[in-house]
Image (cartoon, grey):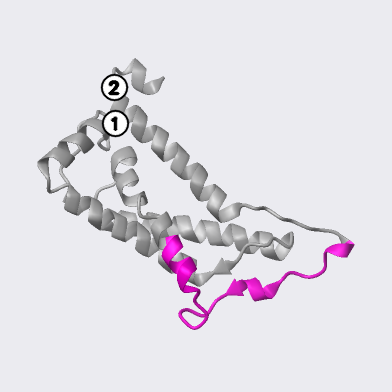
Amino acid sequence: MFLRRRGQLTPGRLAVFWFAGWYAVAILGATMLPLSLAWGPGAGGPDLERILWVPIEDMRRRDFVLNTMMTLPLGALLHMVFGVRGWGPVVNTGFLLSAGIEAVQLFLLLTLHGQRWADVHDLMSNTFGAVAGYLVFRRLMRFAHFRRAVEKCSFDRTGRGSPVAVR
């Protein structure tokens, strides 16, 4: 409604917001589901084996690759939806998003005996994926056709529509 009132609702922007919404749902599903919780006297203690603090030593390579792939679109979406420019904010956002996910998983593991893993490698791979995705996106922005398509679907920091150039 906000975009429509301002005359900025286009099919491209609608598609970007649609994709961003489903991406958020997919991230929540991949990081929180299945949500198996237990509490009360018969629940037992938390499974502390599911907390992986030591980098590299106990890394599960397949999970590292999958977590990296999960956050590849984040840099492009930050650029197109929120007007984020520069790799610094992408690194910070990727790190904070991952830290939030891992904190929730740790909280659920310790308090409600959740079955997810709290893993330092997820923090590293999610941040790496966000940065790698943003770098690929920046490389693609060098092509005029791609850049024009992105500009039609993006917002600048003021929300007026035409984004500033990628630095």
User: How far across and down, in percent of the image, does residue 51 sit?
Assistant: 61, 72
Name the residue type under label 1: Gly
Q: Is residue 133 left or right of residue 116?
A: left
Range covered by the magenta-colored residues:
41-67
Disc sitting over residue 8 in the figure: 2
Viewer-nearest of discs 2 and 1? 2
Which residue is most to the front? 62
Circles 2 and 1: CB atoms closer than 8 Å: yes
Q: Quadrant of residue 41?
A: bottom right
Classify residue 41 as left or right of residue 140.
right
Q: Amino acid at mark 2?
A: Gln
Residue 135 vs 45, above or below: the answer is: above
Q: Residue at x 31, y 59 (%)?
A: 131
Q: Earlier in the sequence, mark 2 or mark 1?
A: 2
**16, above or below 123, in the image:** above
User: Magenta stretch containing residue 45, yes or no?
Assistant: yes
Label 1: how many Cα within 10 Å (few below 14, some 14–19, many 20+):
some
Name the residue at 42% across, 66% down.
65
Q: Residue at x 57, y 75 (%)?
A: 52
Callout 1: helix, strand or loop?
Answer: loop
Front position in the image: 132 or 155: 132
Image quarter of residue 147:
top left
The residue where tag 1 is placed is 159
Residue found at the far bottom of this picture: 57
- Which of the numbered marks, if any, corresponds to residue 31? none
